[in-house]
Image (cartoon, rainbow, N blue to C red):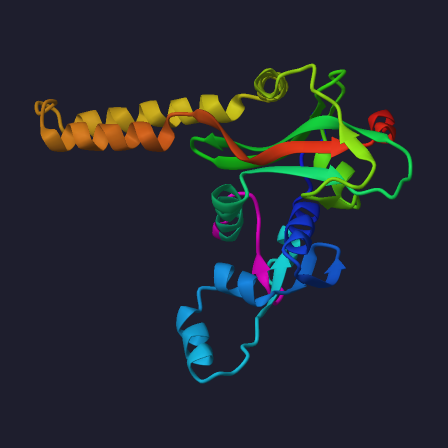
């Protein structure tokens, strides 16, 4: 499955949706003027904002320069990547505040126009073992005829969407229940995982066994020692290969018929 979300596009969509200004977007970096709300949410400056409000002045939200290309990580700015604290922070904020939504494509029409229901799910897959890796995918499933697209955020990027429906528009009733639709998207992601090279898992298991032998040798004759059992458990958690799925956010999007053909 080649449609893994491009990190640069994901970040651009996120900050634009938060009403931030994208000052520049070059190859491998994004320059963002934060709003006051986003500065408070991401930049950890509570004392600054408390002081500014106390003296009755307007604060100055910071400018954030994010580097998405590892080869440019030494340049001024903050290198952000799958697994980085900043990306985890953004994803956690999405999960906390905007996990589910319902949006309508905005159109101008004087004719009765049907809007088709789409289930949109953004999911993070995490691989944990000797090495850590995260992937983020965006899947859209049309709940009337079952059409699926695997790069839904790109699909929605330039589409005007609002929480209220446009005049003369009406929604069509889903033929596929959202719960059933979610299981379909889940199956697609499972198939993706099953096709991946599992060398990382084999390496993790090998490392785990090596560490267990060393630990066993160190505690020889004291295998029931609480400290041994504690360290053995820590090794299992550190090296045992695991794959987890985490829904970042999602919702039901009502789109016009023309969107089905893309």
Span shown in magenta: 75-85
Tell me if I can see residue 223 in this picture.
yes
Q: Is residue 83 magenta?
A: yes
Seen in the picture, residue 191 relative to 110 is either above or below; the reply is above
Looking at the rendered structure, the number of numbered marks drawn on it comes to 0
Quick check: 99 left or right of 12? left
Predominant secondary structure, magenta span: loop
Quick check: 114 left or right of 206? right
Q: Nearer the viewer, residue 113 or 234?
A: 113
Tell me if I can see residue 218 in this picture.
no
> Residue 196, image x and y in percent?
60, 22
Indicate the quadrant where residue 36 lies: bottom right
Quick check: 57 left or right of 220? right
> Residue 256, image x and y in percent?
82, 32
Q: Nearer the viewer, residue 175 or 39?
A: 175
Seen in the picture, residue 197 relative to 170 is either above or below; the reply is above
Residue furthest toward the right?
110
Q: Nearer the viewer, residue 91 or 51?
A: 51
Quick check: 249 left or right of 103? left
Seen in the picture, residue 44 relative to 256 is either above or below; the reply is below
Q: Quadrant of the N terminus?
A: top right
Residue at 40 percent of width and 22 percent of height: 205
Residue at 60 percent of width and 34 percent of height: 250
Q: Quadrant of the C terminus?
A: top right
Residue at 76 percent of width and 19 percent of height: 147
> Residue 214, image x and y in percent?
24, 29
Indicate the quadrant where residue 102 lies: top right
> Residue 210, image x and y in percent?
32, 26
């Amino acid at each position: 499955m080649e449609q893994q979300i491009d990190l640069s596009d994901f970040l651009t969509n996120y900050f634009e949706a938060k009403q931030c200004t994208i000052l520049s977007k070059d190859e491998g970096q994004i320059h963002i003027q934060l709003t006051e709300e986003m500065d408070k949410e991401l930049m950890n400056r509570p004392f600054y904002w408390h002081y500014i409000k106390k003296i009755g002045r307007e604060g100055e939200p910071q400018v954030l320069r994010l580097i998405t290309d590892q080869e440019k990580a030494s340049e001024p700015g903050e290198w952000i990547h799958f697994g980085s604290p900043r990306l985890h922070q953004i994803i956690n904020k999405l999960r906390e505040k905007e996990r589910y939504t319902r949006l309508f494509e905005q159109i101008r029409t004087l004719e009765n126009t049907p809007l088709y229901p789409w289930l949109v799910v953004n999911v993070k897959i995490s691989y944990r073992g000797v090495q850590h890796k995260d992937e983020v995918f965006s899947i859209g499933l049309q709940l009337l005829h079952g059409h699926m697209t695997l790069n839904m955020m790109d699909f929605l990027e330039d589409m005007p969407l609002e929480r209220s429906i446009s005049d003369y528009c009406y929604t069509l009733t889903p033929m596929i229940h959202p719960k059933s639709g979610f299981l379909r998207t889940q199956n697609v992601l499972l198939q993706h995982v099953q096709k991946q090279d599992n060398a990382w898992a084999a390496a993790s298991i090998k490392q785990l066994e090596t560490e267990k032998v060393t630990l066993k040798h160190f505690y020889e004759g004291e295998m029931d020692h609480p400290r041994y059992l504690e360290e053995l458990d820590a090794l299992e958690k550190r090296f045992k290969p695991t794959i987890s799925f985490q829904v970042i956010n999602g919702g039901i999007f009502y789109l016009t018929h023309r969107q089905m053909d893309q």
